[in-house]
Image: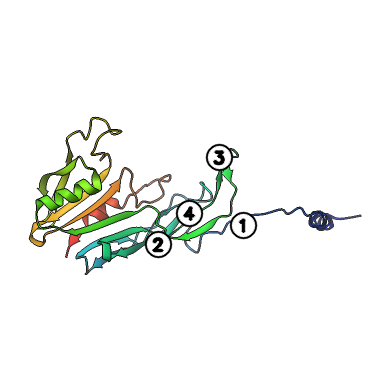
Amino acid sequence: MINTKQKLILIAAILALTGVIVWSYDYPEPTEKEEFQEGVWPEATWSKYVNDELGFSIDVPDKIYGYYGCDPKKVIRVPVKVFEDNKNGIVYISQEYYYISEYDNELRKYVGECEKIANSLNSFLGGWAISIRTVKNDEELDEFIKENYGSGCFAGDKKSWGQDGVYEIRIGGWDQWENLGTTDCPVNYKYKVLYIPEKNKFMSVKLGQEPTFQTDPGTPPYQSYDGRMIDSFRFE
């Protein structure tokens, strides 16, 4: 009598002979210490990132909730990494890598091979893009805001910020709140624009509508690191 093991070997041999190939995707498991016990989020370790060339510093956490586009039920922690594009005056902060797979809308499941992709300047997923610019006057600051936030936007009110000599700039727009579909200043998300006249320099970053750097959003106690990060920004 043929046992179970022999049956499996026989079936495999028949499939091979008939030219039928059965694919079994082996999704790579997150690396050591990425996964954690549900409901327990380890405390973040913070470090200060300093960019001497662009003249600023900001605190960043070591790990955050990471994107795992292969299994919506899996929660992972991934390292935070800084990507420098000093030539263009931009520093990106994001997760070091992410996982992604093809999703079939009709079958409502992931059907492709799970890939681990390293974030880079050429393959960037999410995060912040901090722009540092040198301006001679308020008019040049206003011009940057028009180019990067919308042709109908302008530099609005200034108010003192947490660093001496630094002002936070509110972005204004003549028709900003009338209709987001037609306005020339479609700013319906959080942002931060800081200006230090003494150094003729300003910082601009679009923070988005939802937190970017966070703990597991589905497991309390939920935490967002965004506030602490942006409050730590300093012109050096």
Amino acid identity at mark 3 = Asn
Q: Residue 14: x percent and y percent?
A: 83, 55
| Residue drawn at (50%, 64%) of the image | 32
Image quadrant assignment for residue 50: bottom left
Q: Residue 138: x percent and y percent?
A: 10, 51
Amino acid identity at mark 4 = Gln
* Residue position marked by numbered label 2 in the rendering: 120
> Vertically, is 148 above or below 59?
above
The mark nearer the N terminus, 4 or 1, is 1
The mark nearer the N terminus, 2 or 4, is 4
Asked whether residue 165 is in view, the answer is no
The mark nearer the N terminus, 1 or 2, is 1
Marks 2 & 4, CB-CB < 8 Å contact: no
> Vertically, is 114 above or below 55?
above
The mark nearer the N terminus, 4 or 3, is 4
* Residue position marked by numbered label 4 in the rendering: 37
Q: CA distance from mark 4 to mark 3?
A: 30 Å
Q: CA distance from mark 1 to mark 2?
A: 25 Å
The quadrant of the image that shows the C terminus is: bottom left
Describe the colour scheme in one phrase: rainbow
> Residue 160 shows which numbered tag?
none
Amino acid identity at mark 2 = Ser
